[in-house]
Amino acid sequence: VGMLVSVGGIPAATDLVAGEKERKTLEPLLTTLPSRGSLLLGKYLTVTVFSIVSVIAIMTGIAIGYLINPNSLTMGVESQLYGLNIQPLALVLAVLITILLGMTFSGIQIAISAFARSYKEAQTYLSFLMLVAMIPGYATMFLQPGDLTVVMFLLPVMNTIASFKMLLGGMVNYGYLFVSLAASLVFVALTLWLAASLFGKEKIIFRI
């Protein structure tokens, strides 16, 4: 989920800023009635929606695959997934943290796309975001839910992965989940500020 959220909005982010630069449509767009902040917010929310939809699409496909063939999630071993008991509030918090992660990456993607001179340059920069999501995933791969520390819930990406690991492991610590939620809100604010800062600078947005 963390990896999907980090890359789901890349095509939209690349096209909505760097792509418009290349097509010479960004400058006329900025002269229209809507403010630059409104235009940025529209692009930002579009990228966020693409990120969330990509996760929903993949998870729906996995669920359908499991319904058709339960062994599709057990690598051919004859077994069933059962006994998983998830607390509703904990699940809601984990989903909110995931959405905020998507919003965080959307801000980063818009900022990078605004900084890039061309569509290809933006694609090159944005391709490295996959690594950003993979490293925390591998860092927590062999940890048990009881081994998670509060520091992990303060770090971007890792806090989302740690939240789901704890949730699916049947050990729910609401203190950790709320810490993760608060940290995610801070990350969203910082990345949106960064995107707005770059989008508002003429020497950045129109550099060639």
Image: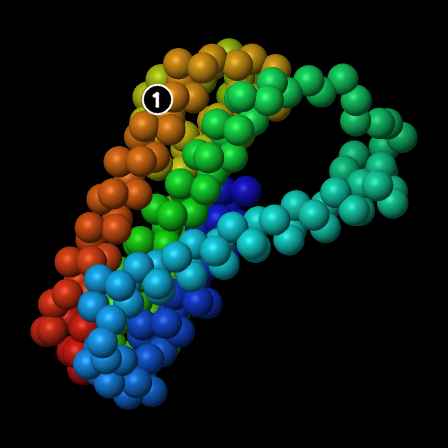
Q: Nearer the viewer, residue 69 or 193?
A: 193
Image quadrant where one finds the N terminus: top right
Q: Which residue is mark 1?
A: 179
Image x and y of residue 147, in percent = 47, 14
Image quadrant where one finds the C terminus: bottom left
Q: Amino acid at mark 1?
A: Val
Using residue 152 as the reference point, say whether residue 95 is left or right of it. right
Asked if residue 179 shows in the view, the reply is: yes
Identify the residue shown where x is 40% and y is 41%. 100
Identify the residue shown where x is 57% and y is 49%. 55
Q: Nearer the viewer, residue 144 or 2?
A: 2
Using residue 135 as the reference point, say whether residue 82 is left or right of it. right
Q: How is the image coloured?
A: rainbow
Image x and y of residue 113, in percent = 30, 67
Answer above or below: position of 195 versus 63.
below
Asked if residue 121 shows in the view, the reply is: no
Answer with the quarter of the image where residue 164 lies.
top right
Image x and y of residue 188, in percent = 30, 43
Answer with the quarter of the image where residue 169 lies.
top right
